[in-house]
Amino acid sequence: MEMKYYDAYLARESGVHLDEDEIWLWGNFVFQSDIEVDRPVRFVLEKKSLTQDFVDVSSAFLVSNKLFEVLSKLTDNYKTYPTVIRKKDGTVIEDYRIFHIRDEIACFNWEKSSYVGKDEVTGTPDYRTIVLDRKVLAEHQDKNIFRMKEIKSAIIINDYAKKMLEKAKITGFIYEELAVE
């Protein structure tokens, strides 16, 4: 049976955003593979509580300790960054970290996907439908989770990873099955 792949993306708005002093990070966790940070990255939580394990803030993937335990079993090519999430009342949440997935695979099938052009700066396709390239994926069967090189904000997972995330009752993701041709 052929492996299935999914785009795993943020299920709902979390109420978390970068602290105003951290705006320099906007998008950097997508386009740079080795950001150096000498202190915890600061975030602000606008809601009463943070109830999901996965949060995407400006493409900085915040993960709970519970989610980190699962992800670290799915890939060994990642980098983490400490975070501090401050609530409106001043209390601090420290059991999240930024999880940067370093594996990138150029698997966007340009012939089969539906898109209307590319961003002039990043080269990212303005896509309608993503189709993954079967030949490329066959060369990377050992990768359970990775970023798509052409759409760096996309987290792609395989069946095995999806089952592990579901078994651990991880919250915050929507899984959209992708075609492979």
Image: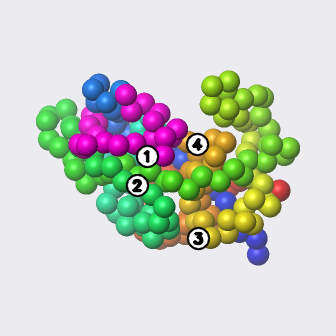
Q: Nearer the viewer, mark 1 or mark 3?
A: 1
Q: Mark 2 points at which residue?
A: 79
Mark closest to the chain's N terminus, 3 or 2: 2
- Which three-letter amino acid code belongs to the residue tagged 4? Lys
- 111 vs 60, left or right, is right
Q: Mark 4 points at which residue?
A: 152
C-alpha span from label 1 to label 4: 14 Å
Vertical relation: 109 (above or below) 6: above
Mark closest to the chain's N terminus, 2 or 4: 2
Q: Which residue is drawn at 79% across and 48% down?
A: 109
- Find numbered disc 2 in the image and state the secondary structure of the residue it sits on: strand
Q: Name the residue under label 3.
A: 160
- Find numbered disc 4 in the image and state the secondary structure of the residue it sits on: loop
Question: What is the span of residues highlighted in magenta in the rendered image?
Answer: 24-48
Residue 4 on the magenta segment = no
Vertical relation: 46 (above or below) 53: above
